[in-house]
């Protein structure tokens, strides 16, 4: 099969750590030139030093003008943008009634508006090229509900909704759109998340499955992107959850509820 990434130009947001860093490494391994961006300029520069040919830039995805300027810079320097990985994200985990003022806004700003900004920045460039692939990182939480994940999950459902609609609209311009829906993956998102009324350490230990590594996630994600899969679910446990939800949303909701009762403080 043709390598979909050889000599292609890719932008990755949230590339300083976790899945974004692993996506960048795997993209480079498959022959792409990667523009690694993150709100943490020093950290993304350090990460880019480990990725052949990568360029690093500071980018806060909540800043539309900065996103547009980055896309223009890539277009000017490389002549085109083949892939945008809208990957940056944050987590606030807790039941709705325990969320603090501002939690919802932060989640919406980074996890959803950040993705919209990415689309705003590259879509017209890709339409003019007649090619390109926008890859939005949602989550398994973007496909199924779970108690304690309501706010995070709402932003990730929004990413799936945006990706589904745009995928249908964009194909007549030669532009592809996919959503990556990772299962639980061992990254700093889990340790850095703001937990509201839930003990994050205990919750992680009580999960009845192993987390994927970011590298495992990246390989599955890029295989899906190369095959232009619309919704790419990574990790065996996540595929199981999505299948169970399809068969019986009530049963999955009941089981997920038991897990969260055990984890609550
Ligand atoms: P991570 O915390 O290791 O990496 C996230 C990166 O995003 C960090 O480098 C951070 O500095 C950056 N970031 C945060 N706010 C930003 C902003 N405003 N602008 C630009 N960059 C910003 O987390 P991870 O796990 O690698 O997360 C990547 C994506 O995968 C996120 O969208 C997350 O929601 C999603 N995801 C993660 C899962 C997991 O279990 N780790 C499961 C499902 C989805």
Image: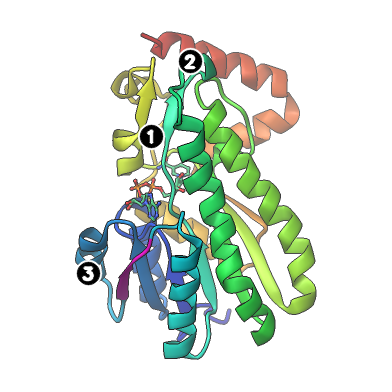
With respect to residue 209, does 263 lie above or below? above
225, 156: nearer the viewer: 156
Residue bearing the label numbered 2: 259
At x 78%, y 65%, the residue is 169
With respect to residue 152, does 133 lie above or below? below
Residue bearing the label numbered 3: 50
Q: Secondary structure at mark 1?
A: loop
Image location (x, y in percent) of residue 119: 60, 64
Image location (x, y in percent) of residue 243: 66, 35
At x 68%, y 52%, the residue is 162
Count of numbered circles on the image: 3
Instruction: Report if the CB atoms under discs 1 and 2 are less than 8 Å apart.
Output: no
Instruction: Report if the CB atoms under discs 2 and 3 are less than 8 Å apart.
Output: no
With respect to residue 85, does 88 lie above or below? above
Q: Is residue 214 left or right of residue 234?
A: left
Q: Quadrant of residue 226?
A: bottom right
Residue bearing the label numbered 1: 210
Q: Quadrant of residue 254?
A: top right
Within 10 Å of disc 3 (Cα), the crowding (few <14, some 14-19, many 20+) is few
- Real-space CA distance between mark 2 and mark 3, rounded to the nearest whole angstrom: 38 Å
| Residue range (magenta) | 55-59
**Upstream in sequence: badge 3 or badge 1:** 3
């Amino acid at each position: 099969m043709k390598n979909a990434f050889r000599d292609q130009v890719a932008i990755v947001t949230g590339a300083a750590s976790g899945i974004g860093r692993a996506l960048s490494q795997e993209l480079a391994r498959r022959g792409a030139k990667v523009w690694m961006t993150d709100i943490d300029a020093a950290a993304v520069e350090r990460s880019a030093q480990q990725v052949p040919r990568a360029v690093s830039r500071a980018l806060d995805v909540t800043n539309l003008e900065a996103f547009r300027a980055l896309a223009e810079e890539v277009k000017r320097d490389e002549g085109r943008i083949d892939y945008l990985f809208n990957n940056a994200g944050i987590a606030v985990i807790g039941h709705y009634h325990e969320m603090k003022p501002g939690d919802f806004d932060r989640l919406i700003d980074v996890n959803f508006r950040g993705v919209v900004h990415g689309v705003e920045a590259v879509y017209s460039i890709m339409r003019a090229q007649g090619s390109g692939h926008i890859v939005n990182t949602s989550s398994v939480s973007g496909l199924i509900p779970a108690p304690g994940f309501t706010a995070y999950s709402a932003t990730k459902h929004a990413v799936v909704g945006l990706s589904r609609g745009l995928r249908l609209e964009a194909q007549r311009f030669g532009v592809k759109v996919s959503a990556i829906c990772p299962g639980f993956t061992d990254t700093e998102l889990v340790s850095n998340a703001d937990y509201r009324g839930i003990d994050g350490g205990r919750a992680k230990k009580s999960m009845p499955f192993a987390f994927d590594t970011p590298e495992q996630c990246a390989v599955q994600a890029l295989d899906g992107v190369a095959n232009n899969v619309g919704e790419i679910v990574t990790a065996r446990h996540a595929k199981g959850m999505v299948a169970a939800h399809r068969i019986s949303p009530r049963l999955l909701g009941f089981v997920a509820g038991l897990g969260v009762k055990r984890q609550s403080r």
